[in-house]
Image (spheres, helix red, strand yellow):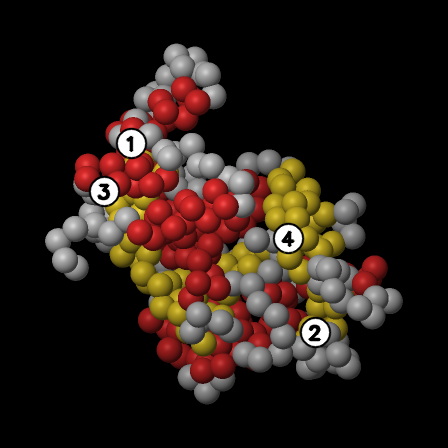
Amino acid sequence: MVGEQKTKPTQHSVQELRRIGIQPDLLAVRCTYPLETAAKKKISLFSNVSVKDVFSCHDADSILKVPQMLYDQGIIDIIFKKFGKVGLVNTSANWDKWNAIINSFANIKETVKIAMVGKYVKLTDSYVSVNQALKHAGAKIGKNVTLDWIDSEELNGNIDKLSSYQGILVPGGFGERGSEGIIRTANYARERNIPYLGICFGFQLAAVAFGRYVCGLQNANSTEIAPKTENPVIDLLPEQKTIENKGGSLRLGSNEIKVEDNTLAFKLYKSNSILKRHRHRYEFNQKYLDLFNKKGMVFSGYSDNKKRMEILEIPTHRFYLGVQFHPEFNSRPGFPEASFEAFVNAAVYA
């Protein structure tokens, strides 16, 4: 640091854009502290962008404050002028609502302690959407969610470390590594009546755990983990059993899910039909559906005319929910996804 803001990186970036035929209309410049007038003028001079079209995108204590930061500098008016839409929209109408959402994150004192048990916890960005969805839910009910990422491989001989948490969440994943730790985690949450939310892989291995420890299915497993298991509670999608080249064969994207009345899922979503995003290749094997129902597990959501089970729950449990889809992708600040909000709320009062 030599007492001035350096503009060369921005200049070079714009020059490279212009070299390939792209001329920017405005620049939002990332910087540590507010962009100085001298720096704006220099960027303008060497980038062929008007000074009034250079905006400071400096550090903020929350990323949620960046929209207001840019709005206060007039970026919305500039955009509308360039599109010839001046005066057609009241751009200040929703700021009170947005700032109320921001304040909901700041005005939190009490905490709720959640264990996130997964396979990629050393790279926490693998679960960034799940992390944010939990924060959205916590802010909505006025609680600060504190997360501990726990490697599922570490739980095989130390499962009782989960006893200090108010809720347990198992996010998505693939493959054999760490799967036994997740199966034991799902069973531990069920036996100890600890609120549990399983997403995709967490849904599948919760079903495996129930098959083993409640239904008495010896060596129940997923064929992804144990291809020759005698009780394939989770199995490959039927239409994929003849596919040899797996590239691009995941079940991806938004799919409609039907929700049964008088279930936890219906209480959460308040609808018999929801749209949720998917990313999986394995699913619950309906050969075991009647047995699971008799033993107390309810499959409250399904898709493709009941071809696929999408939501599982245990009504006698404080909160035990597994979803084959990825609800974290539907969560927004101020509007947490329903399963996350209900999970955090259950954890608060566990």
Residue at horizontal 40 percent and vertical 15 percent from the top: 86
Q: Indicate the secondary structure of the residue bearing disc 3.
A: helix
Residue 168 x, y percent position in the rendering: 44, 65
Instruction: Name the N-terminal-most of marks 1 and 3.
Output: 3
Q: CA distance from mark 2 to mark 3?
A: 56 Å
Instruction: Name the N-terminal-most of marks 2 and 1.
Output: 1
Residue 184 x, y percent position in the rendering: 53, 77
Q: Indicate the secondary structure of the residue bearing disc 1.
A: helix
Which residue is denoted by mark 4 in the rendering? 278
Q: Indicate the secondary structure of the residue bearing disc 2.
A: loop
Q: Nearer the viewer, residue 342 or 126?
A: 126
Residue 138 seen from this side: no
Proximity of marks 2 and 3: CB atoms separated by less than 8 Å: no
Which residue is denoted by mark 3 in the rendering? 39
Which residue is denoted by mark 1 in the rendering? 51
Residue at horizontal 30 percent and vertical 37 percent from the top: 45
Amino acid under label 2? Answer: Glu
Vertical arrangement, residue 313 with respect to residue 185, above or below: above
Proximity of marks 1 and 4: CB atoms separated by less than 8 Å: no
Residue 334 seen from this side: yes
Q: Indicate the secondary structure of the residue bearing disc 4.
A: strand
Which residue is denoted by mark 2 in the rendering? 224
Q: In which quadrant will I find the N terminus?
A: bottom left
Q: Nearer the viewer, residue 206 or 46?
A: 46
Horizontally, residue 157 falls left or right of residue 279, namely left
Residue 108 x, y percent position in the rendering: 24, 48
Q: Nearer the viewer, residue 43 or 236?
A: 43
Q: CA distance from mark 2 to mark 4?
A: 17 Å
